[in-house]
Amino acid sequence: MSAVEHETHDAQYDEVVRYYDLAKRAEWQVRELPWTDLPPIPELKGSPQRQARRRDVWRSVITQQLQADEFAVEMAAQLFALAPHREAKLYYTTMVQDEARHTEAWIKLIAEAGGDAERDPYLDKLAKMQLEADTLEEKVFQMQVFFERLIIPKFRLIARASRGTVLEDLCNRLAVDDGIHHGSGMAYERVLLANATKKTKDKLIKAGNRLLPVFVQHELWRPRERAWIGSAMRAADIARLRQELENGIRMAQSLGLDVSDIELPALAA
Ligand SMILES: [Fe+2]
Ligand SMILES: [Fe+2]
């Protein structure tokens, strides 16, 4: 190691650098998906009405993921622009590329599945709040607690319901990518918070409290196309959401934050 490198080397960021290397190795291309070998979404069966209804469900599932990944490109680009540390900046170059590639794949898949469905208005609102958050500490925290970790179990669920399709293949790849995004985000947030003032940390909890009710609305929202499934699954959705909120609190705690001021919204079944 040269003298210059030695002087600027800060072991705090080793973990972030490790994720940078990992992200580069995990990179894939949209053309590698099985576009010509597998159907885009599960085969539709039954009467024409039933087939149309099932197709709308898949269109809706894909639309929500496309919407989320379009925002993820903006969020990652913002993190890249704002992060003052060169290790984090390098890492975020890979995240911008990942999110762009995810968006590209969803755009191609939604076209093959029959076109866009209804957008989730609460995701629009949540993303606006994330993009307008005041500090880098808030943005990195919210990205992990409200967006990236939560999406991983959802990809697993979608993959399980769409065996033998391009959709399944894509979800499996995205679960890996977002695992890296989440790991690196937590590693960077740990460094940021180790150097943050109590005021910054208190503000972060307050911002989280503002996001929570919108997050709950987003998680429980069901588009027209899936309303008929939504009502039957509401109790299960609420139980899952409760668990997610508890996970979020554990995550905040593991970052050394004082979670006693977190205000959990009431969840009515
Ligand atoms: Fe993504
Ligand atoms: Fe991501």
Image: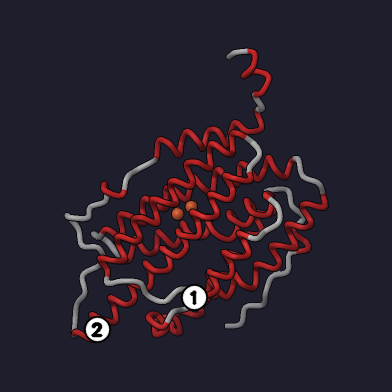
Residue 40 in the figure: left or right of residue 219? left
Quickly name the residue at label 2: 50
As displayed, is residue 109 above or below residue 119?
above
Indicate how the structure is coloured in the image: secondary structure
Q: Amino acid at mark 2?
A: Arg
User: In the rendering, at what x and y percent does residue 72 appear?
Assistant: 50, 56
Quarter of the image where one finds residue 105: bottom left
Residue at figure coordinates x 64%, y 13% from the top left: 3
Of residues 60 and 116, which is closer to you in this image?
A: 116
- In the image, farthest residue toward the top: 2
The answer to whether marks 1 and 2 mark residues whose Cβ atoms lie closer than 8 Å is: no
Q: Amino acid at mark 1?
A: Ala
Residue at figure coordinates x 55%, y 75% from the top left: 238
Which of discs 1 and 2 lies nearer the camera? The answer is 2
Of residues 143 and 150, which is closer to you in this image?
A: 143
Residue at figure coordinates x 77%, y 52% from the top left: 201
* SS at badge 1: helix
User: In the rendering, at what x and y percent does residue 97 appear?
Assistant: 44, 46
Q: Label 1 to label 2, Cα distance in Å?
A: 24 Å
Dot 2, how many residues are within 10 Å of its Cα: few (below 14), some (14-19), or many (20+)? few
* SS at badge 2: helix
* Quarter placement of the C terminus: bottom right
User: Along the polypeptide, which appears first: circle 1 or circle 2?
Assistant: 2
Residue 220 in the figure: left or right of residue 260? left
Mark number for residue 236?
Answer: 1
Quarter of the image where one finds residue 37: bottom left
Residue at figure coordinates x 74%, y 41% from the top left: 194
Of residues 208 and 129, which is closer to you in this image?
A: 129
User: In the rendering, at what x and y percent does residue 220 appear?
Assistant: 52, 76
